[in-house]
Image (cartoon, rainbow, N blue to C red):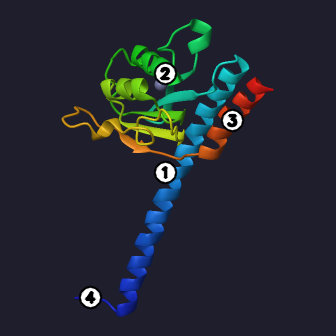
Amino acid sequence: MNVCEPGQDRNVAALSIMFMCGGFLNYMEVYEKYMKEAIREAELAALEDEVPIGCIVVKNGEIIARAHNQRDKTNNPLGHAETLAIKKASEVLGDWQLVNCDLYVTIEPCLMCAGAIIQSRINKVVYGAPDLKGGAFGSSINVLEASNINHRPEIVSGVLADECAKIIKDYFKSKRS
Ligand SMILES: [Zn+2]
């Protein structure tokens, strides 16, 4: 029978902390890797003189859909990056239920997009900058606080937030000048 020395406990604790930190770092690396792809989409929107918000949908480590805001160009109030990416992902999968799909978007989703995310059963939402005026996952309102809601995606916020916010700020600054 092995008897644990006091030092062994510490080692076990240190190892588990290292594992936890390593796991956290790996998660953040993955989040940032995909957020950079969403940012690329936002930059495409800016080039088209659309409010620069970009979105991608990832399933099993593969980007299955990407989109950016197209509201002005198409005169479509539903043409947000998230709704367009969700529609594309549904077409790719041939299924309206985006099971095990993660959505990355540069700005916190609005009420409409939060609804589309819930309706499409997105597994996880990773967003960059909060939207204090229109964000529907906690900044303005939190749709996930609604009772009896039939699907609650996991929410990760603040990934490359400064970079995501800067694209929007620069866009509106250029519109004013
Ligand atoms: Zn939206």
Asked if residue 9 is positioned above or below residue 161 in the image, the reply reads below
Which is more foreground, mark 4 or mark 3?
A: 3
- As measured in the structure, the alpha-carbon distance from the residue carrying label 4 to the one carrying label 2 is 56 Å
Precedes in sequence: disc 2 or disc 3? 2
Q: Residue at x 49, y 21 (%)?
A: 85
Q: Amino acid at mark 3?
A: Lys
Which is more foreground, mark 2 or mark 1?
A: 2
- As measured in the structure, the alpha-carbon distance from the residue carrying label 4 to the one carrying label 1 is 35 Å
Determine whether the residue tagged by mark 4 lies in a helix, strand or loop: loop
- As measured in the structure, the alpha-carbon distance from the residue carrying label 2 to the one carrying label 3 is 23 Å
- As measured in the structure, the alpha-carbon distance from the residue carrying label 4 to the one carrying label 3 is 61 Å
Q: Residue at x 40, y 84 (%)?
A: 10
Numbered label tally: 4
- As measured in the structure, the alpha-carbon distance from the residue carrying label 3 to the one carrying label 1 is 28 Å
Say if mark 4 contacts mark 1, CB within 8 Å. no
Residue bearing the label numbered 3: 169
| Mark 4 Cα shell of 10 Å, populated few (<14), some (14-19), many (≥20) | few
Which is more foreground, mark 2 or mark 3?
A: 3
Residue most extreme to the right: 177
How far across and down, in percent of the image, does residue 155 sit?
40, 43
Determine whether the residue tagged by mark 1 lies in a helix, strand or loop: helix
Determine whether the residue tagged by mark 2 lies in a helix, strand or loop: helix
Residue bearing the label numbered 1: 27
| Mark 2 Cα shell of 10 Å, populated few (<14), some (14-19), many (≥20) | many
Residue bearing the label numbered 2: 85
